Amino acid sequence: MTKKERFIEFVNEIMDAAMVDTWDDVTKEDWKDAFDFFEELKNNKAKSSREMTENGLKVLSWMQENLESMNNVFTSKEIAEGLFTSGRSVSGSMRKLVSDGYVEKIGTNPVQYALTEKGMNYKFDN
């Protein structure tokens, strides 16, 4: 379970426990706004975790194509050079790929990444 998923589960439990009928009208409205926002947050999180950016797709595809030649050890710089793009844009995509479970950090200085089983098995829509 990711940190985000644990956070949502934790807040869900707190909010469920807070559902009481003893609030005055102002407090009820405040809580209703908070509950509504949290539901939107959960829905947006679930939606975004399934979606992959165009750049994320390019990075994941390049990593799959170069899996054997790179021995499943990649740096953002190597990926950027392979995609003819900036290291900064690759770094942003890597954060999302890591948080979504397609890639894992395996080293530091420089930061190195490896495809997870999920990343290796991702099928691209053609």
Image (cartoon, rainbow, N blue to C red):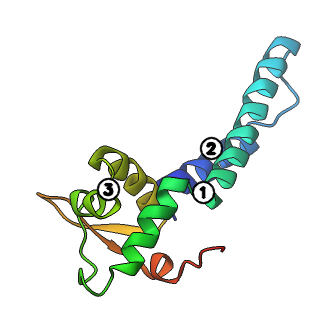
Instruction: Tell me: 24 left or right of 92.
Output: right
Q: Mark 2 or mark 1, which is nearer the start of the sequence?
A: 2
What type is the residue that disc 3 sits on? Phe
What kind of residue is marked 2? Answer: Val
Q: Residue at x 88, y 30 (%)?
A: 21
Q: Residues within 10 Å of mark 1 (few under 14, many from 20)?
A: few
Query: Mark 2 to mark 3: distance in Å?
Result: 42 Å
The answer to which of 44 and 70 lies nearer the viewer is: 70
- Residue 26 percent across, percent down from the top left: 82, 12
Q: Element at badge 2?
A: helix
Which residue is denoted by mark 2 in the rendering?
Answer: 11
Q: CA distance from mark 3 to mark 1?
A: 26 Å
Q: Nearer the viewer, mark 1 or mark 2?
A: 1
Task: Determine the image quadrant of residue 107.
Answer: bottom left
Which residue is tagged 1?
Answer: 49
Residue closest to the eye, 20 or 65: 65
Residue 71's place in the image compared with 22, above or below, is: below
- Mark closer to the chain start, 2 or 3: 2
Q: Position of residue 120 (x, y in %)?
A: 45, 81
Residue under the point 33% across and 82% down: 67
**Going by the image, does 76 lie left or right of 43?**
left
Q: CA distance from mark 1 to mark 2?
A: 19 Å
Mark 3 or mark 1: whose residue is earlier in sequence: 1
Kind of element beneath mark 1: helix
Q: Position of residue 75 (x, y in %)?
A: 23, 63
Residue tagged by mark 3?
84
